[in-house]
Amino acid sequence: MKPIFIFLLIVSVLLFFFWRAQSKWVHFTDSQVKQITNDPLDEQTSVNLEEVSSLPPIVQKYFHLVLKNNAPIIQKAHVSQIGGFRAKPELKDWSPMKAEQYFSTTQPGFFWQAKIQMLPGLNIHVCDAFLNGKGYTKGVLAKVIPIIDAHDRPELNQGAFQRYLAEAVWFPTALLPSQGVQWQAVDEFHALATLSLGQTKVSLTFEFNPKGEIISSYTPNRYREVAGDFVPTPWQGKYADYIQVGDYKVPKHGEVEWHLPDQTYPYFQADIDHIQFE
């Protein structure tokens, strides 16, 4: 067989391998999105701000700021994000990132998928999810080479559920007591929010500014993967630039960071490019 034909055969096999691997990743992510978007909606209910009248004053102020009476209770949300990601604390530069996230509140869960540019022309595709009470993280290089596959761990379930609670600021009816969230005052500008699903129970301390906006969420114990193990680590989300989206007011900007023993490690920052509710 002539060398040119051998070369073409190898190229054809490699192209088929890449096409097959990429198709498998696209099929997987599409199926996870459909798991949320295709679920039927419950009977529509509406916001009644009388239900917050017994909450801590700053929490009441928040709900009266971000919600309107008779606004629909949000059952699904779709968010597009543009921002940056830092894969390791020692990295100084941020890798450009584009992401989409789908939320469900009737069965609390989310699916987040992102394209992170590590080098020009070289992207990592990552998905992070909390579905059916289970959390997982998967990642592939160029939609082909697996680099992350974490699942079936209670630490992941708890961490993903904490993320859901922290990101409910983007679909704020999910933070109402009628949606299962219990609020407890900490001080004038802080309150503890607790949410349960099955055997998983999580709490976050939300910080409010004088206007009533939530500006941060914090937990002293969110599991962080370190060399294949999960270590409870202080974790904080930050929110800014509130905008009006229909009947709701939500932050346009978000940041997330780990508080390591020797440094603060911001690893995610993004602006909301698009948001849609059902």
Image (cartoon, rainbow, N blue to C red):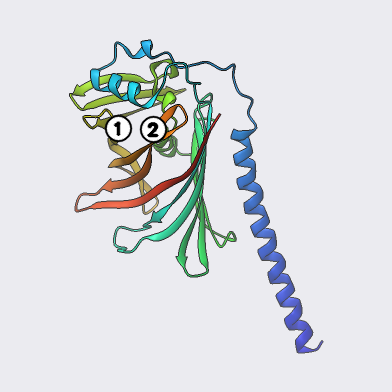
Residue 186 on image: x %, y %: 20, 23
The residue at 53%/23% (across/down) is 106
Mark 1 or mark 2: whose residue is earlier in sequence: 2
* Residue 16 locus on image (x, y percent): 72, 66
Left or right: residue 258 versus residue 66 is: left
Residue 233 visible, this angle = no
Question: Which residue is farthest bottom?
Answer: 2
Which label was assigned to residue 169?
2
Please identify the quarter of the rendering in which residue 164 is found: top left
Q: Provide the secondary structure element on which disc 2 rests.
A: helix
Residue 278 seen anywhere in this rendered image of the structure: yes
Distance between the alpha carbons at the discs numbered 1 and 2? 8 Å
Relative to 242, is 247 above or below?
Answer: above
Residue most extreme to the right? 1
The residue positioned 19% from the left and 53% from the top of the image is 262
Q: What residue is at 27 percent from the left and 28 percent from the top?
A: 212
Contact, mark 1 vs mark 2 (Cβ under 8 Å): yes
For disc 1, the marked residue is 214
Closest to the observer: 38 or 64?
A: 64
Q: Amino acid at mark 2?
A: Val
Quadrant of the snapshot with the C terminus: top right
Q: Position of residue 189 (x, y in %)?
A: 20, 27
Q: Quadrant of the N terminus?
A: bottom right
- As rendered, which of 12 and 232 lies closer to the eye? 12
On screen, residue 187 versus residue 122, left or right, reads: left
Q: Which residue type carries mark 1?
A: Ile
Tag 1 secondary structure? strand
Q: Position of residue 17 (x, y in %)?
A: 69, 65
Disc 1 residue crowd, few under 14, some 14–19, many 20+, Cα 10 Å: many
